[in-house]
Image (cartoon, rainbow, N blue to C red):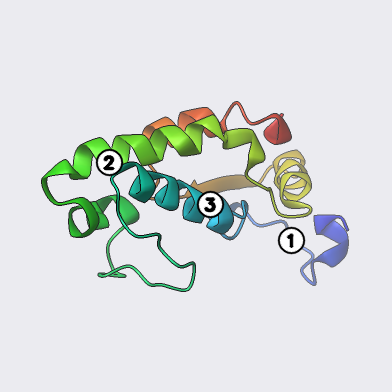
Amino acid sequence: MRVTEASPYTITPKIVFFDLCQTLIDSKKIDHEAINYTLAKYNKEPWPITRQKKDPLKSMKENFPNFFGNQAQEAYDTYLKYLIDEINNIPVFDYACEHLKELHKLGAITIIITNRDIQFIEALKTNKKFK
């Protein structure tokens, strides 16, 4: 469905903000795989998908010391590498790209907000689904 058909408004918005994860891309499964891959490399118990971060107000990276102590940065690099290696396997939600393209055609500025690492963002730009 086109943005213009779905909108009850007659005026195109000037700016639209989107959160990246769980709004445009469905990253929950790949994040879970990446953390369990990393935990296994450090001989730690797997993380059930239903488990919450120790401090939910912090990003995954900020929570790594809770999992890995003084190896947190090294473990995070492992986690990030896994995500980047799997970047083309991260599902994009149905119609996300189409909506972004339509908003662009309409002249709306779209801003995508995320707390993801810049390396992840740079890799995501190469994702074939966003071409």
The amino acid type found where label 1 is placed reads Ile
Vertically, is 130 above or below 106? Answer: above
Name the residue carrying label 3: 20
Q: Residue at x 37, y 47 (%)?
A: 40
Name the residue carrying label 2: 75
Percent x, y of residue 87: 57, 35
Q: Which mark is residue 49?
A: none
Secondary-structure class at tag 2:
helix
Q: Quadrant of residue 5?
A: bottom right
Reading the chain from its start, which is encountered first: label 1 or label 2?
Answer: 1
Q: CA separation, marks 1 and 2?
A: 48 Å
Name the residue carrying label 1: 11
Q: Is disc 2 surrounded by few (<14), some (14 to 19) or many (20+) residues within 10 Å? A: many
The amino acid type found where label 2 is placed reads Ala
Say which quadrant the C terminus sits in. top right
Percent x, y of residue 129: 72, 35
The amino acid type found where label 3 is placed reads Leu
Residue furthest out toward the front: 43
Secondary-structure class at tag 3:
loop
Secondary-structure class at tag 1:
loop
